[in-house]
Amino acid sequence: ERADALPRDLAGRRIVVSAGGTREPLDPVRFLGNRSSGKQGYALARLAAQRGADVTLVAGSVSGLDDPAAVDVVRVQTAAQMQDAVAKHASGADAVIMSAAVADFRPFTFATSKIKKGEGEPDSIALTKNDDILAGLVRARAEGGLSAETVIVGFAAETGDEHGDVLTYAREKLARKGCDLLVVNAVGEGKAFEVDDNNGWLLSADGSETALAHGSKALMASRVLDALGPLLAERSR
Ligand code: CTP
Ligand code: CA
């Protein structure tokens, strides 16, 4: 879509978008990471800015993406850095969209010098949990650390398994996270990661569920922002 043909429905809104994967260092040259490309978050940030929002993009590791025009880009590496950047920019924001693939765990220790191969078998890598940034935002909003009007959007990539399908897991995640909207990508072999298309659901805390048919990440972004608009209007009137 041409930017000049887009609605300016987000004019005056401040939106924080996180995107990409985090990298959790083991030593000065190695990290644990994931395959998130950052494409979905970048598409959201770009489109939100085109629709008039004042956008801060908190970007972890992404592959081959140009900074979106007219977006303030804050670069981070680790989940802890992403948490700090999101918290800083969330205060005063109208909406926070957590599309980043935040590492659930990080190495328990960071070796300040390069780990050597040595002679014997390697040690296992001990891990510890990272804070849940999304859940932390919801908690802060409930406790008054973040404005009660802030709209909080989460993402989930689900495969489903023998215990439940994608939608079942997604509903549970929405309830557990307590965010206002959960954008669910149904993932399987070759889907969602590193490709341009997605399909899934948009689940709202009010119980409404919208299927998202196959479409580009740009189309996905426009559907998410279309759902965000009414929530923003509802909160801050
Ligand atoms: N998320 C976050 N902080 C984390 C982990 C996840 O903010 N430490 C956010 C993601 O950005 C996403 C949402 O939470 O918006 C859901 O992430 P997901 O990995 O699907 O959820 P988890 O609670 O980590 O559950 P799972 O066991 O399925 O990984
Ligand atoms: Ca996770």
Image: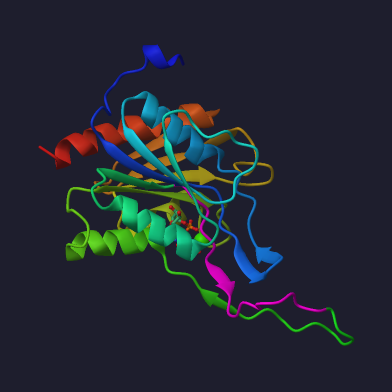
Give the residue at the far right of this rendering: 119
131 in relation to 174, above or below: below
The residue positioned 84% from the left and 79% from the top of the image is 117
Q: Is residue 39 left or right of residue 202?
A: right
Q: In the rendered picture of this protein, how many numbered marks are placed on residues?
A: 0
Q: Position of residue 24 (x, y in %)?
A: 59, 65
Q: Which residues are magenta?
A: 99-116
Q: Is residue 112 magenta?
A: yes
Note whether residue 212 is visible.
Answer: no
Q: Quadrant of the C terminus?
A: top left
Q: Residue 127 location in percent, x, y?
A: 59, 77
Could you tell me which residue is drawn at 90 percent across and 86 percent down? Answer: 119
| Corner quadrant of residue 136 | bottom left
Which residue occupies 68% across, 46% down?
Answer: 189
Residue 50 lies, with reference to residue 54, above or below; the image says above
- Residue 45 to residue 1: above or below: below
Asked whether 213 or 224 is in front, the reply is 224
Q: Is residue 74 above or below residue 107?
A: above
Is 44 in front, or is 117? Answer: 117
Extreme-left residue of the structure: 237
**Residue 87 seen from this side:** yes
Q: Is residue 12 magenta?
A: no
Spot occupied by residue 39 in the image (x, y as percentages of width and height): 56, 38
Picture coordinates of residue 198 (x, y %)? 55, 36
Q: Nearer the viewer, residue 84 or 100?
A: 84
Q: Which residue appears at 86% of the width and 84% of the height?
A: 118
Residue sticking out furthest to the bottom: 120
What secondary structure do most residues of the magenta stretch adopt?
A: loop
- Front residue of 187 and 218: 218
- Corner quadrant of residue 191: top right
